[in-house]
């Protein structure tokens, strides 16, 4: 079964610093991978997705992620954190080839210090 | 595009009462998902439909939970009878067909069972 592991339930960075949120996946088939962001009291919003095209994926709000098959990783980065980036971030993997259901990681709460 | 619409946004009910959550997916999307989010268990997939047909309901906790999708523009999640442990935020998401696996989430319904 497909799964994702997000390392670090809480990450704190200073405003302007690099953001790095880690996600490792396990999949028996070529995965589709996603990063979602959830702001307080809101639903999840798609940041970016990997669907077997370019391994470096650019998303909204200056975020990007790189698919590394050899490391089974799909880490999320942003060069310079902004206060508005404070939220919870979820990595997700498609459950199986041809199946649209996603398995979500446990989430990483990003705190941005002024 | 109105996005995924969920109602009610908040529901407070007493143990033993029936609760019905409603969802209107994005027009033209052919997959619909119900999730439950709690602090303890994170984001759990309860059930998903494809073309109004339930595909995977293995996440439905027990017989007290039921979901229907009578047509492409409406779905319900019903809990009868409700219990305090059902307190959570329930999200509905929809996904377009084709090769696009991304899901679009509604704002959620916060359910409190006292």
Image: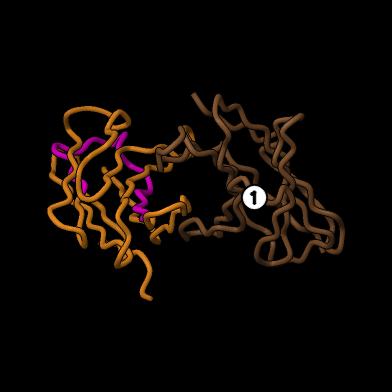
Chain colours: A brown, B orange
Q: Image point 20% across, 36% down: which residue?
A: B65
Above-or-below relation of A1 to B25: above
Q: Which image quadrant is residue B61 in?
A: top left
Q: Residues within 10 Å of mark 1 (few under 14, many from 20)?
A: few
Residue indicated by mark 1: A53
Residue A96 pos. (x, y %): 46, 32
Q: Secondary structure at mark 1?
A: loop
Task: Name which quarter of the figure residue B2 lies in.
Answer: bottom left
- Residue at left 27%, top 37%? B55
The residue positioned farthest toward the right in the image shown: A17
Q: What's the chain of the residue with tag 1? A: A
Residue B98: horizontal and vertical position, in percent? 40, 54
Q: Is residue A9 left or right of residue B65?
A: right
- Relative placement, left or right, of A31 versus B91 is right
Query: Residue B97 at x, y = what percent?
Result: 37, 55
Quick check: B21 above or below B83?
below
Left or right of residue B43, residue B63 in this image:
left
**x 35%, y 48%: residue:** B90
């Amino acid at each position: 079964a497909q799964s994702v592991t997000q390392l670090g339930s809480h990450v704190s960075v200073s405003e302007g610093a690099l953001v790095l949120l880690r996600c490792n996946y396990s999949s028996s088939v070529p995965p589709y991978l996603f990063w979602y962001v959830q702001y307080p009291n809101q639903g999840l919003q798609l940041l970016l997705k990997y669907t077997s095209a370019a391994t470096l994926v650019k998303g909204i709000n200056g975020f990007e992620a790189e698919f590394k098959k050899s490391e089974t990783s799909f880490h999320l980065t942003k060069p310079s954190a902004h206060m508005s980036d404070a939220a919870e971030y979820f990595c997700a993997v498609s459950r199986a080839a041809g199946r649209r259901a996603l398995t979500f990681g446990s989430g990483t709460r990003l705190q941005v210090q002024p | 595009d109105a996005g995924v619409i969920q109602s009610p946004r908040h529901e407070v009910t007493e143990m033993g009462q029936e609760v019905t959550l409603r969802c209107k997916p994005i027009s033209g999307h052919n997959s619909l998902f119900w999730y439950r989010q709690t602090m303890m268990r994170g984001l759990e997939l309860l059930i998903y439909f494809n073309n109004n047909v339930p595909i995977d309901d293995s996440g439905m906790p027990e017989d007290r939970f039921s979901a229907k999708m009578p047509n492409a523009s409406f779905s319900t999640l019903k809990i009868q009878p409700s219990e305090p442990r059902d307190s959570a935020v329930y999200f509905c998401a929809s996904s377009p067909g084709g090769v696009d696996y991304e899901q679009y989430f509604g704002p959620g319904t916060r359910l409190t069972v006292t």
